[in-house]
Amino acid sequence: MSYYSPSIEKLIESFEKLPSIGHKTAARLAFHVLEQTKEQTEEFINSIINAKQNLKYCSRCYNISDTDPCPICSNDKRDGSKICVVEDVRDIIAMEKTHEYKGKYHVLHGAISPMNGIGPDNIRIKELITRLHNEKIEEVILATNPRVEGEATAMYISKLIKPLGIKVTRIAHGIPVGGDLEYADEITLIKAMEGRVEL
């Protein structure tokens, strides 16, 4: 039995459909929306509609953008000889926050995961290989996540690229800054050892 009116219950259910939102958080968000002015609510609704209508995938890297090509692909000051391959658009944001990488990107929109029915044809691997044939690329940096799916995806892509004579690198994984060795799992420690550099 619900203690809320049908309209509030429907609003709570809508928020519960968002990732990582449980019932309590959904209820809190629903009541927050109800406490806003009509203008604030309309602005919130319009921002969602505007994003859905105006955002599109970049035809080169598959980043989400208001323009095609996206600002990164159309920036001539970036190094077009390097492509950093990521799983998700949010990974680009993480890389850009470092202010270190100056090349281009390619977003796969997922990782190979047979358990979830996701194979190589379900993500943007074909499009990456097409880019490598059409653009002058010297290095492909595989920055997939350090999970089983990310590792499998990196290995699969690496095997496809190597015959093309293009350098393939993998970002190092290891202990986070400020982390303690005693709390690191075995795979993280192995990756940290493999990615060690000379001082």
Image: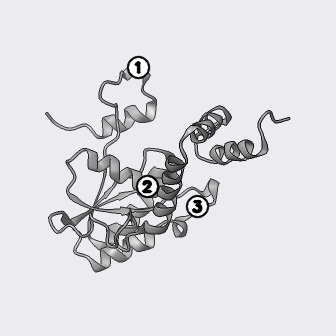
Query: Which of the two discs, 3 and 2, labels the residue nearer the N terminus?
Result: 2
Where 154 falls versus 133 (above or below)?
above
Q: Quadrant of residue 175?
A: top left
The quadrant the C terminus occupies is top left
Indicate left or right for 88 with 82 as reference: right
Question: Can you tell which of label 2 and label 1 is closer to the viewer?
Answer: 2
Mark 1, Cα crowd under 10 Å, few <14 / some 14-19 / many 20+, is few
Which is nearer the eye, 87 or 42? Answer: 42
Q: Are marks 3 and 2 in contact (CB under 8 Å)?
A: no
On the rendered structure, is 166 left or right of 112? left
Number of the label disc, if any, that sits on residue 150: none
Q: Estimate the spatial distance between the alpha carbons at disc 1 and disc 3, rounded to whole Å.
A: 35 Å
Image location of residue 102, percent across then percent down: 20, 56
Residue 187 sits in quarter = top left
What element does badge 2 sit on?
loop
Which corner quadrant of the image does residue 74 belong to? bottom left
Q: Earlier in the sequence, mark 1 or mark 3?
A: 3
Q: Is residue 135 above or below residue 93?
A: below
Q: Given the image, on which type of amino acid does mark 3 rest?
A: Ile
Q: Which residue is mark 3?
A: 118
Identity of the residue drawn at 65% across and 31% down: 24
Closer mark to the observer between disc 1 and disc 3? 3
Front label number (3 vs 2)? 2
Number of numbered tags placed on the structure image: 3
What residue is pinned by disc 1? 182
Can residue 143 be seen here?
no
